[in-house]
Amino acid sequence: MEPYAREELLACCIARLIGDARHVAIGAASPIPATGVFLSNFLHQKPLRISLLHKRSGNPFTEGSRELFDLAGQGRIDLFFLGGAQIDGEANINLVQAEGKRFPGSFGSAFMYFAAGRTILFREEHSKRVLVPRVEFISAPGWSPPGVERRGGPQALLTGKALFLWQKDQRRFRLESVHPGNTLDDIVKSTGFGFDHQAAANTTAAPSAGELVLLRSLVAKEISANYPEFAARVWL
Amino acid sequence: MSGLPSNEVVFFKNSEAIAAEIPDGAFLGLPPDYSMPAMAVVHALIRRDAKHLKLLGVPVLGLSADLLIGAGCVAEVESSAVSLGEAGLAPRFTEAVEKNLLKIKDATCPAIHSGLQATEKGVPFMPLRGVLGSDLLKFRNEWRVIDNPLRRNDPILIVAAIQPDVALFHARWADEAGNVWIGRRKELATIAHAARRCFVTCEEIRPGDMLEDELLAPGVLSSVYVSGVAQARRGAWPLSVAGVYGIDDAHLTLYAKAAKTGEGFRRYLEEYVWNRTPEKNSSPAASRA
């Protein structure tokens, strides 16, 4: 099997989660999600609309940065990505402060997590520092009580070690697969919250030869235009 | 309302003259790094040792805020985030918050847009979906949850109108009539509409009136909102002006490294801010545009 970069594996995981979304928006500093979305687009050759908030040339937003939120508010964004300095087992995310450290801030999360059709949580670091029993600050809640209008919520949590799917009714993550090189035991030990899992965990499928060809050609070209440092690090 | 600009745009000599118009303590609305901050004026504010500024990020902030914070010009920041994007955390902001040297009012992007839109319309608040259950609400007295009066048992957030004292940004063109071409960067119009005064630097001052040109007019901020303009070539550097010059990624990386320590930040200011005049600020940085 051809060697691949960790970023390429994660992008493939994201591509496999896109499903029937027709319009995907990508916010600040998200090169791996953007890579996965472009890969999905080239793989399936279906007309996926991809709106990169920070696209440097040909940016799709002509009404200023509020347009992303207005689109989402109307239900025109099917899929969005969020991260977190901390993420907990109820899918709450914290982008503000943790363990005395300050992080950039909540960005549009407190709105987008509600308004986008679904959200993929993405954080490369998989540790008890990041995946905590309870976030110190809720930038955006993972679920809302009945009576609070909310279109969407979490679909999955992807980390550098594993993929979890969100179970809306149980309000709990279920381990879907463990990335090559890690074991179920590693995941249990490095996750600060409880989650459901099978007795023997699935292994995340490695990128296929076809996926790698696309990643290193058409996708790399798209990504280097907007995330030059990331593209240089992964593909040069 | 009094004290709002009408249509008497003042043409200033340079960025220093604009910095002199922004008083200490001003509530200053700034665009994000991707939407043309007036970096030459930011440098001039540092050189004039501005104090106690309150920054409003529309809706987020980056290099401009980090420089002002590091230089001791800022008392308070209201923003949805402060970061250097791909270059990482904003180091002076991060340290100032961790050391409790800076008051921070955390927001979320559409709440800032909506607050400014309320001011644009002259209404006291705007409703916004989402946000309920976020801890942001605990720290914002001017955000309230009400029951939707048109459909009971439907809690919804309202955010108070936001009125900056000053809007400050850079643009590609202004014209002799005092209009400013902002193109697709409409958040600049939102800040300008909502602010009491608006100062703009531009790459070039065009003869005539852009409102006479059907192709340019849709991207024009009318002079009714503009208090003052000054030319500043490469006035957004090291950030970009779409179609004119690209973001200087290498410089942002250099800054992110330098500003990790107070000493490194001081050396950065020495080289790129204190010893630079508006004329010299047309940096030799490579342009990708």
Image (cartoon, coloured by chain):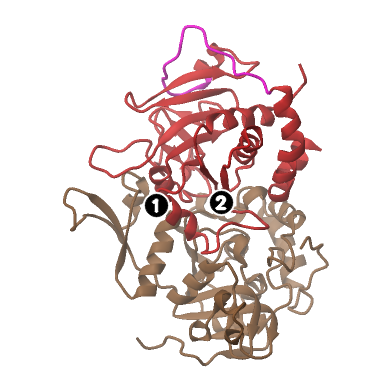
- Near mark 1 (Cα within 10 A), the count class, few <14, some 14-19 or many ≥20, is many
Q: Main secondary structure of the magenta part?
A: loop
Residue B182 lies in the magenta stretch: no
Of the residues shown, which amino acid type is indicated by label 2? Thr
In space, the residues marked 2 and 1 are separated at their CA atoms by 31 Å
The residue tagged 2 is B94
Callout 2: residue from which chain? Answer: B
Query: Disc 2 on helix, strand or loop?
Result: helix
The residue tagged 1 is A73
Q: In what quadrant of the picture does the N terminus of chain B appear?
A: bottom left
The answer to whether A218 appears left or right of B71 in the picture is right
From what the image shows, is residue B288 above or below residue B281?
Answer: above
Q: Residue at x 16, y 51 (%)?
A: B152
Of the residues shown, which amino acid type is indicated by label 1? Gly
Query: Disc 1 on helix, strand or loop?
Result: helix
| Display colour for chain A | red
